[in-house]
Image (cartoon, rainbow, N blue to C red):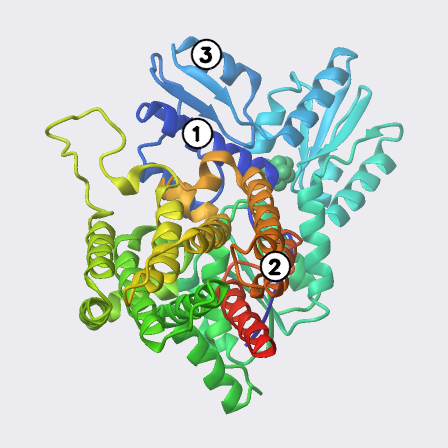
Amino acid sequence: MKVILAKSAGFCMGVRRAVETTLEVIQKEGTGVSTYGPLIHNPQVLNLLEERGVKILRDIPEKESGTVIIRAHGVPPVHKEKLQMTGATVKDATCPHVVKVQVVIKKYLKHGYATVIIGDRNHAEVEGLMGFTGSLGKVVSNREDVQNLQLNVPYIIVSQTTQDATSFEELSSSILERFPGGKVFNTICDATHKRQEEVRSLCNDVDAMVVVGGKNSANTKRLAEIAEGKGCPVYQVETEGELDLDALAKHEFVGVTAGASTPTWMISRVVAILEAMPGKDEGTLKKSGSKLLWLLLATNIYVSLAGGALTYTAEILQNNGPGVSHFLISFLYLFAMHNLNRFTDRKQQKFNDPLRALFYEKYRWPLLIISALSLALALTLVFEHGLKPFLLLTGMSIFGILYSVQVIPKSLIPNIRVRGLKEIPGSKTFLVAVAWAFITALIPAWSDSHTPDMMTLVVLFFILLLVFVRNALFDVFEVQGDRIVGKETLPVCIGEQKTLFFLHIILGALIVLLLLMPFLGLMSEAGFWLLPGILYIIVLIRLYTKGKITQGPKLEFCLESVFFLLAGLAWLAESLHR
Ligand code: SF4
């Protein structure tokens, strides 16, 4: 099935800010974190926050400790004051767009103006805004409300930030007709407006729309209403489990959009299921091709082949004759370790790649047995090349297996956060790069009575940086799922923008290495030829940041393919040099 994902789908700025504020407080304080009312309108995110110890206060208690977070929709000012009087630290995560509306209302109230809010009277944001209107606030949701409206003082009209633009215009014109002279403030936020416009235009290109988001989310409902209004069949779901696959199978092109409080990982789950559905007119060859690709990625065969290809490149860069055995050792070792690691990352995987998580659950034992056999075979093969590479690979394997083990038991030292290597922030990103550099550059150079030299170290460093970029990019793609389960990757710790900036610096360093090292005789001339591979990664990052390619199998395939591209370029350089 062909799926078009709306560019703006996913957390809006206000929701992202509220969720990140809460996660930061959890990280700092660990316990005693609560939100006043549900933080956002998405039950799945709320459940995850609850799992991490966040409780929801439905009423204001007399006494409270810890930190209370005010949700993105805002609250009446009197509620904030009461919360502060409970003794808790109050952190206000009201969206800045909502704050702007509150400020407008306050300003005009001072001059005796009444406020008409166009929106849903039971929505948390409207309830909060009403708290700023003194006793001069009115809510209008439909034409009937306009007819019943009574105004006898000057007034302003504002909008709930997630209101539909067309309905706001209609209702505000009707109010002005009845009570001329009111000042109109269109306070619909950009994020909402953009999403709505996108749905309107997407409906022209697709056969049906899937709208993902909380059932109680006003902006999600509105997106569905807009699509319906355009005559597009709409499937509104909270999770991928609610997709009506039989009904959806009738369509060839399906658009996917999501409410402002729907996390990326939830949208990806829906998109992954839809993309895996065979299209009505899709040829058998294409269907089998997509299935095969997915299987190669899910079983880690593709990434392991990529590791084999990188071994080939590393040997050419060191002027060593590439060997099939070295390729196989890398392939088998990486296959084993990547599969074993997937089992320890199951919780986070459930968010970032649910289809793959299901696949691991189903084929758990065969995959574990094949991985163990692969590791044994890699060790046997490397033993034939000498004791030193054998010992190194054995050490790496033990280290890899123990990586996820908590070595400091809670009973021994109860109050520390880091109990094992895996819990050191960003450790996986770096250690996986080290393992790749060792297996692809060091072990082949150490085999067959060769001794690693300066050239080996330079190539090892090059690969370390390259694979680090690969790993950190995957962390960027999966940042929301990681953040919500509390996995501290580089982008979770320093933010996506800073991580991408840092990665561009590393990519710059890689370009310098490829240009400089062959001149210094510390890398073969094939180094120059690898430059397009680095440019390929830069283009991929650009496409991702521009929203042209989104998290999922396609992006994973494109990123892993860089190693095949590099191997191809190295082969070309080698062939022309011969
Ligand atoms: S939809 Fe707009 S107003 Fe509401 S939280 Fe998001 S950015 Fe803020």
Q: Which residue occupies 34% across, 54% down?
A: 435
Of pointers 3 and 2, the one earlier in the residue sequence: 3
Q: Quadrant of the N terminus?
A: bottom right
Q: As displayed, is residue 423 above or below residue 116?
A: below
Disc 1: which residue: 24
Q: Name the secondary structure under disc 2.
A: helix
Asked if residue 57 shows in the view, the reply is: no
On the picture, is 256 further left or further right than 484?
Answer: right
On the picture, is 266 further left or further right than 519?
Answer: left
Q: As displayed, is residue 44 above or below residue 123?
A: below
Q: Name the secondary structure under disc 1.
A: helix
x and y percent of residue 117 in the render?
A: 69, 32
Residue 540: image tag = 2
Disc 3: which residue: 84
Quadrant in which residue 447 is drawn: bottom left
Q: Nearer the viewer, mark 3 or mark 2?
A: 2
**In the image shown, does 325 or 331 lie closer to the viewer?**
325
